[in-house]
Image (cartoon, rainbow, N blue to C red):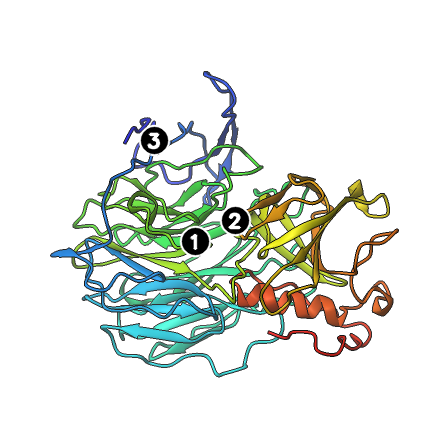
Amino acid sequence: MSLLKVKKAPREDRNEAICTHDCGSDAPPTRCLRVRSPGGRTYTTVLTLVLLALTTGGLSPSTAGGASPAPSPTVAAFNATFAGAPPAQSPAAVAIAATANGPGYYVLRSNGVVDAYGAPNYGSLAPDSLANGVTAMGIALDAKTGGYWIVTSSGIVRGFNAPYLGEHHIHQGGWGQFPAAVAIAAAPGGAGYYVLRANGGVNSFGVPFRGSLAGHLHYAATAPVVAVGIAVDSATGGYWIATSIGGVTNFDAPFDGSALTQGHGSYFGKPVSAIAAATTADGGGYYLERANGAVINFSATPYGSLAISRSMPVGGTASGIAVDQVTGGYYEAVDATPLDGYLNPMRGLTSLVPQEIDQGVDYCGSGPIYALGNGVVKNVYSNQWPSGVFISYQLSDGPAKGHYVYVAENVTPEVRVGEALTPSSEIGVLNDAKTCLETGWADPPATPERAAGHVEYNGKNSTAYGLNFSALLQKLGARPGLPQPDGPPGPLASGWPTW
């Protein structure tokens, strides 16, 4: 393993700059955004890019006493006790939280179901209680009661053997207009909790507000960068916020470095998905988790990762990390939701922002887009669509065998007509742009190229085919799009697969 040193700021500094580096030169220029602290002072620092060279060997998922007794595609333990895991199927695992006295942890599913391992289960969100387009996003442990809080993308917070202290309900209508809740973190001693939103905003409940990144991220602009995780420093009560491109900003907590590369744009197709605070006994600091299962440590002890051990399931996405408070090790949760040979085609996108469902599903972000399943490319370009791109391919197996999938708009094609595809095939690259992309079911190739059910679309409604494709993506672990309220969706064709 080779590691470029991080230029660390003094630990007494409380709010550091968001700095960016251009990775295309030996001596990259540095650009910094100054972040103002709640008290009005401004701090600026320069961060050095951290690169991890993953070796072919490395550590394997393990318990404190050796190898994991039952390796799982959805939970891996590193210097922590493996106690079980949910199966690799829908609904996707989206977050994980470890108990205060170990060994034990909770895995949260996208539908709000909580699976408990080595710990008492205090309940889950009611079945079918989430509105269309809303998913469970985060879980945090109440140190006082041993219970936990769950937050949904719409900002709803529910306590299970933990006191309800408030919530900030988020209206639907496009996440750019109403940034979704993406994570929740508990304050030390069970005092309350913080809810993080995708634009970097923080809502505090029962605890003092210490600042946020709201207004400092390229969230609704031409290059969306989203906040993905928040972790509380048990020593100071402050917190760190991590963004999808690897930035870490501290609020009344010591700054120990970040993995930030570019101010906006792709992060090697491996976005950061979570952050977790290390234990004080282990020296403090924090861990960043990337979607490929890599764990980057900052002033914290490394214990291995899914990326190093090469045990990430095909198509899987690391979705959460939790530190074992007894051993100092950690758990990684994995969204591994294969469905009849289909895999999440959005798993490599950085700064993924779901938008409206119309003829298909719109997303903003950047990075590689994969094929849904095995198939053959039928079309690549169409001047009837924005940016002139309309990639379509016909699935050759699975429940939707024979049907066509399209990826259109601000995408650079990486395939040609007639090319055979698998779920590991990169069909295009989404470029940061306000137009984003649209993906869904397509009509058979024709001139002009059209989405399936296009006659149902009135310019403001979600079609039945758009809703159906969004449901499939959600089954595969992608965040669903946002249904539109205008007009009836119309019918699906007879015998069309449902999810």
Q: Tag 3, which secondary structure? A: loop
In the current view of this chain or complex, which residue is farthest to the top?
27
Residue 215 in view in this figure: no
In-image side of 265 versus 37 (left or right): right
Name the residue that disc number 1 marks.
Answer: 314
**Which disc number belongs to residue 424?**
2
Q: Give the residue at x 51% y 70%.
A: 167
In depth, the one of 327 and 373 nearer the eye is 373
Q: CA distance from mark 3 to mark 2?
A: 41 Å
In the current view of this chain or complex, which residue is farthest to the left?
65
- Other-residue count near label 3 (Cα within 10 Å), few / some / many at <14 / 14–19 / ≥20: some
**Which disc number belongs to residue 9?**
3
Image quarter of the N terminus? top left
At label 2, the amino acid type is Ser
Q: Earlier in the sequence, mark 1 or mark 2?
A: 1
- Kindly indicate whether the residue at mark 2 contacts the one at mark 1 (C-beta within 8 angstroms): yes
